[in-house]
Amino acid sequence: MEPSPESVLTQLRKGTVDYCVLACLRSGAAYGLEIAERLGERKVLFASGGTLYPLLSRLRQQGWVTTTLQPSPVGPPRRYYHLTDEGERALTVFTETWDLFAADVTTTIKETA
């Protein structure tokens, strides 16, 4: 069976979106909708908001993010996510590894074309 572009994207997202969320938090704390909007600016990186909150929960369980509740100008308080030192280290390792991985994938694809 021939893969669809969407199935390929799904597989690629599985290993990378967690780290993209961490990267979004590198510049400062953000609440869920802000993170979703930042990721949504990319064309293929983020599929749906329904996957974000389970992902954030997983990152919190791993100790890569912490949360605080802060008042909202409208509605209930917002849960803000903060990158921890452990999350920063995980992002650094991923970034270093990603650069090597992406370069190898690009080289392999271009060499065999």
Image (spheres, rainbow, N blue to C red):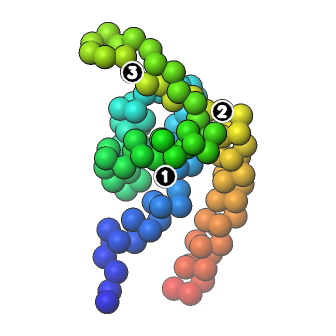
Residue 100: name its quadrant.
Answer: bottom right
Whether residue 104 is visible, yes or no, is: yes
User: What type is the residue that disc 2 sits on?
Assistant: Thr
Nearest to the eye among marks 2 and 1: give it. 2
Element assignment for label 1: helix
Element assignment for label 3: strand
Tell me which residue sits at (35%, 32%) in the image: 33
- The N terminus: image quadrant: bottom left
Element assignment for label 2: loop
Look at the picture and state if 34 lies above or below 112: above
Q: Residue furthest bottom?
A: 1
| Nearer to us in this view, 103 or 72 | 72
Whether residue 23 is visible, yes or no, is: no
CA neighbours of label 3 inside 10 A, class few (<14), some (14 to 19), many (20+): some
Q: Which one is earlier in the sequence, the residue at label 1 or at label 3?
A: 1
CA neighbours of label 2 inside 10 A, class few (<14), some (14 to 19), many (20+): some
Q: Position of residue 7 (x, y in %)?
A: 35, 71
Q: Position of residue 112 (x, y in %)?
A: 56, 87
User: What type is the residue that disc 3 sits on?
Assistant: Arg
Q: Position of residue 107 (x, y in %)?
A: 62, 75
Q: Position of residue 59 (x, y in %)?
A: 55, 43
Tell me which residue sits at (66%, 53%) in the image: 94
| Nearer to us in this view, 1 or 78 | 78
Distance from Cα at disc 2 to Cα at disc 1: 17 Å
Look at the picture and state if 60 lies above or below 78: below
Q: For mark 1, what is the residue?
A: 17
Look at the picture and state if 60 lies above or below 111: above
Tell me which residue sits at (51%, 85%) in the image: 113
Q: For mark 3, what is the residue?
A: 78
Looking at the rendered structure, which numbered label has been put on residue 84? Answer: 2
| CB contact under 8 Å: marks 3 and 2 | no
